[in-house]
Image (cartoon, grey):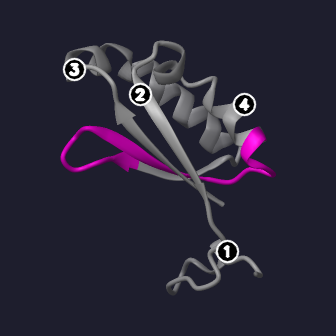
Amino acid sequence: MFIVSLTYKCELDQVETHLPAHIEYLKKQYSLGNFIASGRKVPRNGGVILARANSKSELNTILEQDPFHKNDIADYDVQEFIPTMVGEGLEALREDA
């Protein structure tokens, strides 16, 4: 599993211009099973995505399709982790170490 932290590189008015296309991209990735959760950072200077992929390389290829990436709206920091403990109801996210 991966944590993807997006940090905006521009003003929010530029982010808003590309937001509808970004949301459509997110919906597609959810339907493909690549994304588990996503949302805005507080304060609103970017966002976070929890993602599943076979490798960091595969995830980077997926992220390159994001309109925020294509239009140089955000920087992406990708961190892989293994969720070995989860809360009740999230058992499907647990992985063996």
Q: Are marks 4 and 2 in contact (CB under 8 Å)?
A: no
Residue 11: mark? 3
**Please, what is the three-letter code of the amino acid marked with disc 4?**
Thr
- Labels 3 and 1: the sequence-earlier one: 3
Say which quadrant the N terminus sits in.
bottom right
State the extent of the magenta-drawn residues as a range: 39-57
Which residue is depicted at the point 76% across and 81% down?
97
Among the 4 quarters of the image, the one containing residue 52: bottom right
Q: Residues within 10 Å of mark 1 (few under 14, many from 20)?
A: few
**Rendered position, 2 above or below 65:** below
Which residue is depicted at the point 73% across and 76% down?
95
- Labels 4 and 2: the sequence-earlier one: 4
**Rendered position, 71 above or below 29:** above
Return the x and y of residue 4 as percentages of the image width and height.
52, 48
Q: Give the number of callouts.
A: 4
Return the x and y of residue 75 as percentages of the image width and height.
45, 31
Distance in Å between CA atoms under marks 1 and 4: 25 Å
Nearer to the camera, 5 or 51: 5
Distance in Å between CA atoms under marks 4 and 2: 16 Å
Q: Which residue is mark 1?
A: 92
Q: Which residue is mark 4?
A: 61
Distance in Å between CA atoms under marks 3 and 4: 26 Å
Which residue is depicted at the point 37% across and 47% down?
39
Return the x and y of residue 35 as percentages of the image width and height.
60, 48
Q: Which residue is mark 2?
A: 74
